[in-house]
Image: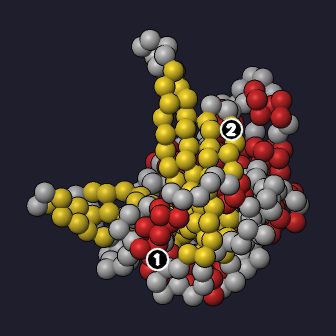
Amino acid sequence: MLERLLRYADKQLHFGELVTGVRDRRHWSHVPTAEVVKAVLEMFFARLGSLNALEKLNHLSSWKNLPAHSVSADTIGRVVEVLDSSSLRASQKLLYSCMKKNKQLVAPLHGLIALALDGHESHCTYNQRCVGCLDRDIDGKIQYYHRNVTAQLVFDNFSFVVDMEEQRPGEGELSVAKRLYERVLRDYPRAFDVVLGDALYTNAPFINMILDSGKHVITVLKDERTNIYQQADFAFANCEPSLSFEYGSKSFTCRDEEDFRMPDVSRALRIVKSEESTTFKSQLDSSLHVRTNTWMWITSLPPIRAGTRAVHALGHSRWSIENEGFNELTNRWHSDHIYKHSPGAIRNFFLLCMIAHNIFQCYYKRALKPALQRALTQALVSLQVAADLSGNRPRCHSP
């Protein structure tokens, strides 16, 4: 399975060029940088979750042709720490270009590709601290932690994790998001049409920055104290629903109004409100119950560009960065594991995990036929990769 994955990645995604393009700051190196990068990517493919688990494979025959087979976990950590992050981001851009060229990224039915931004706390500890650690007081005790803002492109068939930017001491999430957005806009100027954010991003300077860059914006509106929320609440109380539909056990009633003014925002905005009801069965007596929820989104998209249903779909697609981004990378890809506690190592391991995740998802969804995807979960494919790494190949042939 590992050989097939690497062969597919090399043929379709220029895996060799992607790996050899990564540089580091070492003046002299005994171990080639490309082999260390490849070893770390294979560790993520197999979801080993630890450099020590990777080191235990050093003596196996399946690693005998790898120049880095005798490198310790500490050495790999030191090499990754001094990797050039810009070269990793260039490899990520090359990966995106290959997938786009091969038509592996499909736009949603409404035709708008979204860039989702959100903050994420990778870990926290009371015992270890580095120069990049943030700190906070928890019941009189100082806790150290790392946070970052991650960007993800949301397609119809794929969620491509693009880039991340770490939060520095004394910074807020919005400042980090602005810095990340400027770099993503420079590297992927035509990759997305609209920027998605949660309620924190309903901020006039941030919205103006998105609009000035020629993109549209959708953010969650839920602060009842703001003037624009009160305007929307009054307007929706006196208007008829513009759209009602059902999907499975859920029913949606949407209202859509334009020409709302937000202080310091350069243009008028549009607000879509969705009242959602979910029918579910009680486990105790099998009786039916209804749970209701309300969402409001503020957007700069005109109705001629995106109808109510499209804004509703885009607003909910922001959860892709939570479910298919942070949840997937953390729980299954061990992206939050601290392989080496330093700002450079944490950043570079996270970037390598993003690259490995995108390659693996592309291989699983494009190289395996639908029948095999139904028979093989992604976790099982990773187990077969781990078996190939350890030399314990299954008796049955890999599909």
How far separated are the C-alphas under marks 2 and 1?
A: 32 Å
State if disc 1 and disc 2 touch (CB < 8 Å).
Answer: no
Between 89 and 284, which is closer to the camera in this rendering?
A: 284
Q: Is residue 325 left or right of residue 140?
A: right
Residue 391 in sight from this viewpoint: no
Instruction: Report x, y in % for residue 97.
Output: 80, 69
Q: Is residue 313 left or right of residue 59?
A: right
Instruction: Report x, y in % for residue 358.
Output: 69, 56
Q: Secondary structure at mark 2?
A: strand
Query: Which residue is drawn at the image coordinates 61% and 76% (left, top)?
Result: 259
The residue wearing badge 1 is 203
In the displayed orientation, state which residue is furthest to the left: 140
Query: Which residue is drawn at the image coordinates 35% and 68% (left, top)?
Result: 225
The residue wearing badge 2 is 246
Query: Which residue is drawn at the image coordinates 75% and 22% (left, top)?
Result: 395
Q: Is residue 332 left or right of residue 258?
A: left
Between 72 and 211, which is closer to the camera in this rendering?
A: 211
Between 224 and 39, which is closer to the camera in this rendering?
A: 224
Identify the mark at residue 142; answer none if there is no mark: none
Q: Residues within 10 Å of mark 2 (few under 14, many from 20)?
A: few
Amino acid carrying label 1: it is Asn
Applied colour scheme? secondary structure
Instruction: Report x, y in % for residue 261.
Output: 53, 79
The quarter holding residue 339 reads bottom left
Residue 337 in sight from this viewpoint: yes
Between 350 and 63, which is closer to the camera in this rendering?
A: 350
Amino acid carrying label 2: it is Glu
Query: Which residue is drawn at the image coordinates 80% and 31% (left, top)?
Result: 372
